[in-house]
Image: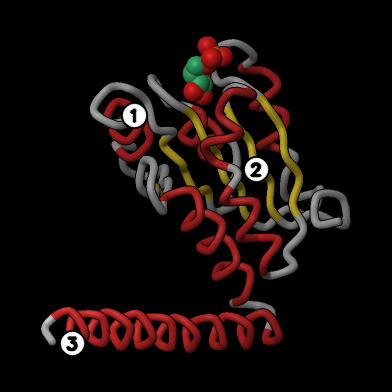
């Protein structure tokens, strides 16, 4: 449902092979009921498609674009060059030091063209989704409330882990 109903977030990636590595971004949007669309496009192999997509994103109602790419990861930067929407870059994990190539290509933008880059691998893709939710929530009080509840649950989750670990250590030490 989130994929089609008035998408507010565009998730674009350089290759279909990126999807399994970054789909946690979409899952985070699903969690908060934020609509999104998903596209494969390449800054290098189909630059005109990227230009067209990014330069019409605002008029199509998008509020944030999440752009994922690996290796010479220029997609987020090129998208950012064609729109005033906030762009969140996901450096796709690779076998080069876990995605250091992607991370540097995504994050080392020149001044005047910002890309908010998340971590390569680990919680990075999920954080990209959450960051998009937080940006959209600035103008959506109901979504903001969901984020406040989410933060509260994080505290509870850590308290439970703390109690469980301390309890297990206490049992072991007996
Ligand atoms: C990047 O090159 C893509 O984002 C992908 O991570 C990487 C390899 O793409 P394929 O050659 O597998 O299509 O543009």
Of the pair 32 and 122, the residue shown nearer to us: 122
Q: How crowded is mark 2: few (under 14 residues within 10 Å), some or many (20 or more)?
A: many
Callout 3 secondary element = helix
> What residue is pinned by disc 1?
105
42 versus 139 height, above or below = above
75 sits to left or right of 10: left
Q: In which quarter of the image is the C terminus?
A: bottom left
120 sits to left or right of 22: left
Measure the C-alpha gap from mark 1 to mark 2. 18 Å
**Mark closer to the chain start, 1 or 2:** 2
In this view, the residue farthest toward the top is 45
Of the pair 41 and 3, the residue shown nearer to us: 3
- Tell me the residue at 69%/53% (across/down): 9
Could you tell me residue 62's position as x and y percent? 73, 53
The numbered mark at residue 11 is 2
128 versus 16 height, above or below = below
**Mark closer to the chain start, 3 or 1:** 1
> What residue is pinned by disc 3?
170
33 sits to left or right of 120: right
Q: Nearer the viewer, mark 2 or mark 3?
A: 3
Measure the C-alpha gap from mark 2 to mark 3. 46 Å
**Location of residue 148 by image quarter:** bottom right
Q: Quadrant of the N terminus?
A: bottom right
């Amino acid at each position: 449902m989130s994929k089609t109903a008035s998408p507010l977030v565009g998730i674009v990636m350089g290759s279909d092979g990126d999807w399994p590595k970054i789909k946690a971004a979409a899952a985070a949007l699903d969690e908060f009921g934020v609509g999104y669309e998903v596209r494969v496009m390449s800054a290098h192999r189909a630059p005109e498609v990227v230009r067209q997509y990014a330069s019409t994103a605002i008029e199509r109602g998008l509020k944030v674009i999440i752009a994922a790419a690996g290796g010479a990861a220029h997609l987020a930067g090129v998208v950012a060059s064609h729109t005033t929407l906030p762009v969140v870059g996901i450096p796709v994990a690779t076998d080069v030091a876990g995605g250091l190539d992607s991370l540097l290509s995504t994050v080392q933008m020149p001044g005047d063209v910002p890309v908010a880059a998340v971590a390569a691998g680990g919680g990075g893709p999920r954080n990209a989704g959450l960051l998009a939710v937080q940006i959209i929530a600035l103008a959506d009080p109901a979504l903001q409330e969901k984020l406040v509840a989410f933060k509260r649950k994080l505290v509870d989750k850590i308290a439970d882990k703390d109690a469980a670990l301390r309890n297990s250590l206490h049992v072991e030490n007996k």
